[in-house]
Image: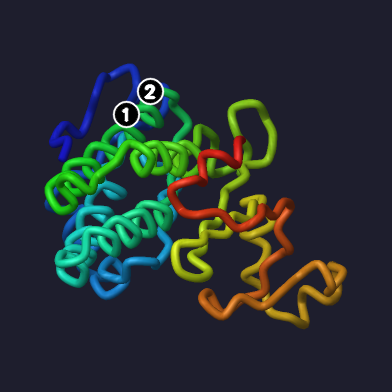
Amino acid sequence: MNNKQVKSKERVVNHGEVFTAEREVNAMLDLVKQETERIDSRFLEPACGDGNFLSEILKRKLAMVKNRYRRSPHDYEKYAVIAVSSIYGVDILHDNVKDCRERMFQIFDKRYGENCKQSANDRCREAVKFILKRNILCGDALTLKDVNGKPIIFSEWSLVTGSMTKRRDFRLDQLMEGHENKKQLSLFQDESDWQFDKEVQAYIPAPIREFPLVNYWEVQNYGE
């Protein structure tokens, strides 16, 4: 983990950037320990920096993947990809986003190689890089817009059957609105555009894009 809490005084003044120390990160994650050990539980860090929180979450998830699937390289690979795909981050600074993606990939790749050995392959690595590119984005979590002033769009990755994965894209601002109850939504929204999500126990908007099923190691073929 990066133990430096400040990169420069200028960044503190201009962006209020102060990183959370390792001890505090782990203490906070221990408060939701059960969720950090669920391989497919989704996390979003709205000011992720270079990944202090997200990297620790990924390490915990991958430890659970190893505990359950270390005897099967195929299953380890599949569930390690699921672990990566469930983690999201936003940061306003380009260099933080780049560093966070690289940091997350290195954590995945080290453990992937250690557990799958000769079975580890570049096709899976490229899939993980693509997922991180879609999941760790440069933008402002206060305005819910990206660096181009457009709505932040995240991809949801769902393992449907076997190795087949479904991608659906959602606008973050619409997802945030989904945490209202059905009665409130019906006053302002077309109810047909919303659906109840059992995982989050809330109504969420319909995706803005849906993609056909592909094997999880081929998600990079979706394109942007």
Q: Is residue 102 above or below residue 156?
A: above
Task: Look at the numbered discs 2 and 1 and tell me whether their residues touch, using CB distance below 8 Å.
Answer: yes
Q: Which mark is residue 170?
A: none
Colour scheme employed for the rendering of this structure = rainbow
Q: Quadrant of residue 75?
A: bottom left
- Image quadrant holding the C terminus, namely top right
Write the residue at 22% across / 43% down: 107
Q: Secondary structure at mark 1?
A: helix
Q: Is residue 49 left or right of residue 202?
A: left
Q: Secondary structure at mark 2?
A: helix
Q: Which is nearer the eye, 182 or 199?
A: 199
C-alpha span from label 2 to label 1: 6 Å
Residue for badge 2: 95
Picture coordinates of residue 1 (x, y %)?
15, 40
Amino acid type of the residue tagged 1 in the rendering? Asp
Q: Which is nearer the eye, 36 or 63?
A: 63
Q: Residues within 10 Å of mark 1 (few under 14, many from 20)?
A: some
- Residue positioned most to the front: 118
Q: Is residue 150 above or below residue 178?
A: above
Picture coordinates of residue 46 (x, y %)?
45, 47
Can you see residue 71? yes
Write the residue at 27% across / 53% down: 58
Can you see residue 49? no
Amino acid type of the residue tagged 2 in the rendering? Asp
Residue for badge 1: 99
Q: Quadrant of residue 113?
A: top left
Picture coordinates of residue 91 (x, y %)?
44, 36
Q: Is residue 39 left or right of residue 45?
A: left
Q: Residues within 10 Å of mark 2 (few under 14, many from 20)?
A: few
Write the residue at 15% across / 69% down: 67
